[in-house]
Amino acid sequence: MGEYSYSANVKFDGKSVYITPTSTNASGMTISCNGKEVAFSRRDMLTKADKSKVSAYNPAVLFYDAITTASDCKKVDNAYVFDGKTSVGNFTLTVNQSSELVSLNIPDADFSIEFDVNSK
C-alpha cells in the first residue's frame, strides 16, 4: 500500500479472505473478511468488527471486495484480466491460464498485490 510493502500469505476459501503478514512486526496476525465481518486474530486473541465499521482500505476488505465482484473478463496474452469497482475505486485482477492469481491493482487506493504463484 503506497510506499509500504510486506510479504503475506493470502488465502480465499470461497467464503472468506485471510491475510497473514510474514515479514513485519505483524507476522502471525491474520486479518480476515467474509463480507459481513472483519476479524483480527493472533495467537489466542480474536477481535471481530462489522465490515461497515472497518476502513474500506483494510487489505482484507479490499481483496474480498475485488475477488467477489470481479467481472468484465478479457484475455490478454497468456492471462485473464478482470475489471471491477470497489468502494475506493476501480481494480484490475489478473489470473493466469492455470487459474492462479497473478496480481490485484487498485490504483485509486494506491494498493496492489503481486502473488507468488510458484510457492505452494
Image (cartoon, helix red, strand yellow):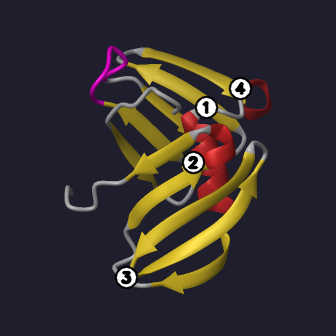
Mark 3: which secondary structure?
Answer: loop
Amino acid tagged 3: Gln
Q: Is residue 26 magenta?
A: yes
Secondary structure beneath disc 1?
loop
Q: Residue at x 47, y 27 (%)?
A: 3
Q: Which residue is mark 4?
A: 54
Q: Are marks 4 and 1 in contact (CB under 8 Å)?
A: yes
Q: Which mark is residue 58?
A: 1
Tell me if 61 is positioned left or right of 52 in this view: left
Q: Which mark is residue 97?
A: 3
Q: Residues within 10 Å of mark 4 (few under 14, many from 20)?
A: some
Q: Secondary structure at mark 4?
A: loop
- Where residue 60 appears, x then y in whole percent? 56, 39
Image-based side of 69 in relation to 110, left or right? right
Q: Which mark is residue 63?
A: 2
Amino acid on which the number 2 mark rests in the picture: Phe
Mark 3 surroundings within 10 Å by alpha-carbon count, few (fewer than 14), some (14 through 19), many (20 or more):
few
Residue 34 visible? The answer is: no
Q: Tell which circle, 2 or 3, labels the residue nearer the N-terminal end.
A: 2
Give the CA distance from mark 2 to mark 3. Answer: 20 Å
Look at the image and give the residue range highlighted in magenta: 22-27
Q: Pointers 2 and 3 in contact (CB under 8 A)?
A: no
Give the distance between the C-alpha atoms of the residues marked 3 and 4, in whole angstroms.
34 Å
Examine the rendered structure and indicate whether residue 108 appears above or below residue 117.
Answer: above
Q: Considering only vertical position in the picture, is 16 above or below 43?
A: below
Q: In the displayed structure, does residue 9 sit left or right of residue 84?
A: left
Image point 50% across, 46% down: which residue?
112
